[in-house]
């Protein structure tokens, strides 16, 4: 990721409400919760729109790597708009890029990336993305900044 993304750089958004427990003793959302917001926007999309069956499906996603860069503080009772885009869609892996924005704000609070590798549930061996999932994720591919 290069430069500071804006809301316009993300084709998919989900609103996430912070919870009282998200705050730490310093009065802002604890850093670990940002990763939970990443998980929430990604997995909500996969379950609701891409057909991921987390309970009985043959294919599951495992996190291979993740990263977060903090640029502003969030705090309870903020609502967070989580923007999502795809920067790489491979045969069995996906690199998501996420931008977190305070509701109503254009200022980026955090940005990060998250790589899923999709595997067979029983063997934990990489497997191609199911067709419906691939079709859903293809709609969110955003070219690299140098290609825009």
Image (tube, rainbow, N blue to C red):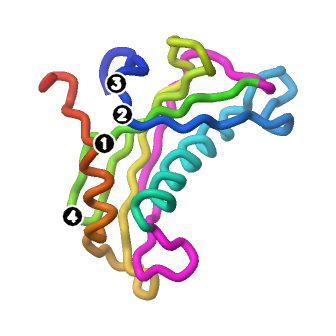
| CA distance separating discs 3 and 1 | 10 Å
Which of disc 1 and disc 4 is earlier in sequence?
A: 4
Q: Secondary structure at mark 3?
A: helix
Magenta region includes residue 61: yes
**Relative height, residue 81 to residue 73 (above, below):** below
- Residue located beneath label 1 in the image: 140
| Range drawn in magenta | 52-77
Q: Residues within 10 Å of mark 3 (few under 14, many from 20)?
A: some
* Residue 14: quadrant of the picture: top right
- Point out which mark residue 11 bears: 2
| CA distance separating discs 4 and 1 | 16 Å
Q: Secondary structure at mark 2?
A: loop
- Residue 82 placed where, x, y %? 53, 33
Q: Is residue 61 left or right of residue 75?
A: left
Q: Nearer the viewer, residue 8 or 144?
A: 8
- Residue located beneath label 4 in the image: 91
Which of disc 1 and disc 2 is earlier in sequence?
A: 2
| CA distance separating discs 3 and 2 | 7 Å
Q: Are marks 3 and 2 in contact (CB under 8 Å)?
A: no
- Residue 67 placed where, x, y %? 47, 38
* Residue 11: quadrant of the picture: top left
Q: Residue at x 29, y 75 (%)?
A: 127
């Amino acid at each position: 990721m290069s430069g500071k993304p804006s809301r316009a750089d993300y084709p998919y958004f989900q609103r996430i409400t912070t919870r009282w427990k998200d705050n730490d003793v310093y009065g802002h959302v604890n850093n670990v919760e940002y990763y939970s917001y990443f998980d929430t926007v990604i997995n909500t999309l996969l379950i609701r729109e891409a057909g991921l069956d987390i309970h009985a499906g043959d294919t599951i996603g495992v996190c291979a790597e993740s990263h977060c860069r903090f640029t502003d503080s969030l705090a309870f009772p903020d609502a967070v708009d989580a923007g999502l885009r795809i920067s790489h869609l491979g045969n069995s892996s996906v690199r998501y890029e996420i931008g977190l924005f305070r509701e109503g704000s254009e200022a980026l609070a955090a940005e990060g990336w998250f790589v899923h590798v999709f595997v067979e549930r029983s063997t934990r061996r990489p497997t191609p993305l199911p067709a419906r999932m691939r079709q859903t994720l293809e709609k969110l591919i955003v070219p690299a900044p140098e290609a825009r």
